[in-house]
């Protein structure tokens, strides 16, 4: 049950406990401005509205010609808005969803007693933060959020963990009309902006266990470095403790699916970690350890 007297942590009722999270907004960006900077967004967004292949191709051709012109940025943005405004979007049904935006995947080696702690920052470092840019679905505006935290998460004995941020999204089924004629049906969705400064974009933080092997299948998983420890010749009973720290200012894109009402489209979130991260590892003796670190995660090949 979720109400003012009894509720689960992170529930959507509005009575959730204070999570102590510093979340600020970098503001919304109109779709036309995003489209100018992100050409991949144009065809994707119009497809989410089911404009039709021929009409999408015509729009993209006009967009590319405009983008390659010598017109000023404000002029190009205005023209893109005018192109989009040739059709009217009418909302038919709306609902609220909470999307789990992935931040980081990490695992522990497959050894009894192995443990990995992933820390987003320590008190003696400059405070770090995540920057999330969540692109809207179906020509909806994007939203940029900054999440400042110093949380620590733990994986043991081969577990794969996913750290995520729950973000509330308003999605809607819409119809597309041109001169009062219905030409398509689709989906629009974007982040819900708080009505007051005391309300939050997100409710809590999350960490969940993934199937083993998933830690190396996510976005941003091209290895930046390998992590090697040769402990196979050590017959001692005590495990070894290793700490690695690094700075990160790398962004990667993730696609998050909308789950309600049979919808199979999803917004794209650009995840960027700024400043420090830290990994503390407890590594039992008797194994050869080989792991890999990437912008989106940490995983182990052996053991």
Image (cartoon, rainbow, N blue to C red):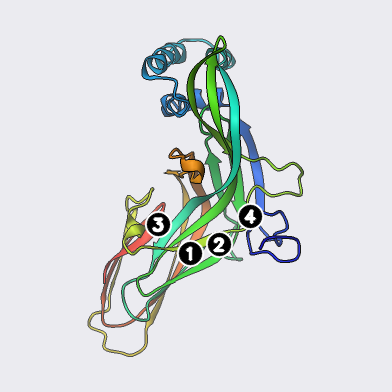
Q: Specify the label residue 203 is tagged with.
A: 4
Tell me whether circle 1 and circle 4 mark residues in contact (CB < 8 Å): no
Tell me whether circle 3 and circle 2 mark residues in contact (CB < 8 Å): no
Q: Earlier in the sequence, mark 3 or mark 4?
A: 4
Q: Nearer the viewer, mark 3 or mark 4?
A: 4
Q: Give how far across and how far down residue 268 sits, in percent.
A: 47, 39
Q: Earlier in the sequence, mark 1 or mark 3?
A: 1
SS of the residue under disc 1 = strand
In the foreground, 162 or 187: 187
Does residue 289 appear anywhere in the picture? Answer: yes
Q: Specify the label residue 166 is tagged with.
A: none
Check the image and name the residue furthest to the bottom. Answer: 237
For residue 256, above or below residue 291: above
Image quarter for residue 283? bottom left
Q: Give how far across and how far down residue 2 sits, in percent.
A: 68, 60
In the foreground, 119 or 102: 102
Q: Which residue is mark 3?
A: 297
Q: Nearer the viewer, mark 1 or mark 4?
A: 4
Calculate the distance from the C-alpha at mark 1 to the C-alpha at mark 4. Answer: 24 Å
Q: Is residue 261 left or right of residue 113?
A: right
Calculate the distance from the C-alpha at mark 3 to the C-alpha at mark 4. Answer: 23 Å
Callout 4 crowding tier (Cα within 10 Å): few <14, some 14–19, many ≥20 = many
Q: Which residue is mark 1?
A: 278
Tell me whether circle 1 and circle 3 mark residues in contact (CB < 8 Å): no
Q: Which residue is mark 2?
A: 121
SS of the residue under disc 2 = loop
Image quarter for residue 30? top right
Q: Give how far across and how far down residue 205 sits, in percent.
A: 58, 58
């Amino acid at each position: 049950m979720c109400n003012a007297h009894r509720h689960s942590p992170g529930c959507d009722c509005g009575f959730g406990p204070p999570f102590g999270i510093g979340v600020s907004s970098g503001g919304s960006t109109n779709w036309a401005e995003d489209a100018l900077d992100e050409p991949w967004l144009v065809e994707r967004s119009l497809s989410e509205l089911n404009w039709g292949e021929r009409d999408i191709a015509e729009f993209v051709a006009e967009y590319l010609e405009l983008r390659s012109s010598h017109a000023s940025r404000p002029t190009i943005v205005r023209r893109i808005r005018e192109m989009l405004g040739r059709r009217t979007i009418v909302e038919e049904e709306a609902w609220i969803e909470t999307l789990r935006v992935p931040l980081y995947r990490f695992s522990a080696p497959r050894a009894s007693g192995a443990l990995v702690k992933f820390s987003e920052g320590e008190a003696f470092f400059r405070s770090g933060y995540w920057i999330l840019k969540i692109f809207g679905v179906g020509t909806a505006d994007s939203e940029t959020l900054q999440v400042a935290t110093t949380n620590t998460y733990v994986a043991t004995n081969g577990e794969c963990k996913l750290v995520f941020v729950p973000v509330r999204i308003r999605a809607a089924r819409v119809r597309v009309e041109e001169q009062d004629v219905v030409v398509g049906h689709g989906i629009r969705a974007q982040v819900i902006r708080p009505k007051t400064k005391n309300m939050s974009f997100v409710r809590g933080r999350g960490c969940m266990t993934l199937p083993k092997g998933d830690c190396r299948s996510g976005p941003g998983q091209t290895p930046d470095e390998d992590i090697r420890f040769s402990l196979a010749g050590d017959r001692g009973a005590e495990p070894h403790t290793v700490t690695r720290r690094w700075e990160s200012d790398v962004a990667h894109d993730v696609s998050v699916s909308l789950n309600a009402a049979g919808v199979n489209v999803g917004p794209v979130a650009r995840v960027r970690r700024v400043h420090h991260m830290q990994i503390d590892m407890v590594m039992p003796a008797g194994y050869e350890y080989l792991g890999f670190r990437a912008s989106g995660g940490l995983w182990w090949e052996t053991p």
